Amino acid sequence: MSEPLHTTPAVTITTPTGTEEEPDMPEDRRSPTARRRRLSAELETLIKQAELDAYHVDDALGWTRGKTAKMMRGAWKLPSLRDVRDILDLLKLTDDDPHREYLLTLARQGRERDWWHPYREMLSETFTTYIALETEAQTVHTFEQGVFPGLTQTPDYARAVIRNGPFELDDDAIEERVTVRMERQKLLTSSADPLRLWAILDEAVLCRAPSDEPGQKGRQIMRDQLGHIRELAALARVTFQVIPFSAGLHAGVSGPFTILEYPEPASPDVAYAENLAGELVLQKPEDLKRFRTAHERLKGLALSPTASLELMVAAAADLT
């Protein structure tokens, strides 16, 4: 049993160097959804450091049972500044404590709208969570076995992938999805803090040209896509590797996946996987270990970045 609430000690906060400045990250690298997620994680840590639990906080603040637990697991639509202040007052984080303002800044930013808000009806809740996490990630490690990663697709290639996907979509719906995909790609060229991308591709990706699109030839779309990959590979923070057919069976045969990594302890790394059965966002250490092990094995089997680009050049030449 924790101490009575009236004797709750002031909490001593240990934060990474520069954490208090982090809410002021570049606008194009900030997601309100990710802000809310981080705020939830921070509040959970503070409550546990105070040797309290969600029920104690509910009782102390006169809240309905379950309200604090909901906040701690990030199940809120918009943070209430008053609620956050009440928790911080309970934990004795005073106005002169810089961590208090850091958390209130997270709450204010968490009340904003994400850039994809106009497209929210066509995107699943899991995928919007993924986009939010991707927006604030420092590094993306990804493996693809059938198509180029969404972050690297040209508009025409993306359009072909979506049109030939498992869903029946009209032209307007396809264009909306292409727009979202192109907007995500701005992370790679952010002038302030570009995303680091390490993409491993099965060689099959280079061989699977789109079927002919209305008014365009699939082979030309594929040539343009391969040219775009070479341009991206010239960026200092982007790396491509290809697993050749000669490598045989490998750790990625069960499907594509992505790992998102963050520099701050308050934002745990996550893994993402998608198939026809649905989408998964995973952050348990045992789950991440499996994906990291698979990615390292794939990296070891793949050609070097230089040899991989040479293979792409050859693939493009075969399409002429």
Image (cartoon, rainbow, N blue to C red):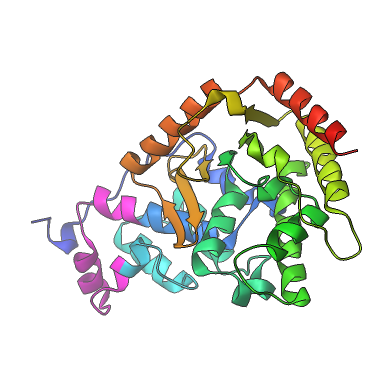
Give the residue at x 40% y 63%: 74
Q: Residue at x 68, y 45 (%)?
A: 148
Residue 54, given in percent of the width and then of the height, sits at: 24, 64
Q: What's drawn in magenta, residue-wise?
A: 44-69
Q: Position of residue 300 (x, y in %)?
A: 52, 21
Q: Choose between 255 and 18: the one closer to the eye.
A: 255
At 75% from the left and 44% from the top, the residue drawn is 190
Q: Tell me if residue 252 is in the magenta stretch.
A: no
Q: Is residue 121 above or below residue 236?
A: below
Name the quarter where the N terminus is drawn.
bottom left
Q: Which is the main secondary structure of the residues drawn in magenta?
A: helix
Q: Residue 180: where, in percent of width, then height? A: 71, 62
Residue 45 is covered by the magenta coloring: yes
Q: Is residue 189 in view from this perspective?
A: yes
- Of residues 143 and 124, which is closer to you in this image? 143
Which of the 4 image quadrants contains residue 266? Answer: top left
Q: Is residue 288 left or right of residue 29?
A: left
Residue 278 horizontal side relative to residue 135, left or right: left
Q: Nearer the viewer, residue 108 or 270?
A: 270
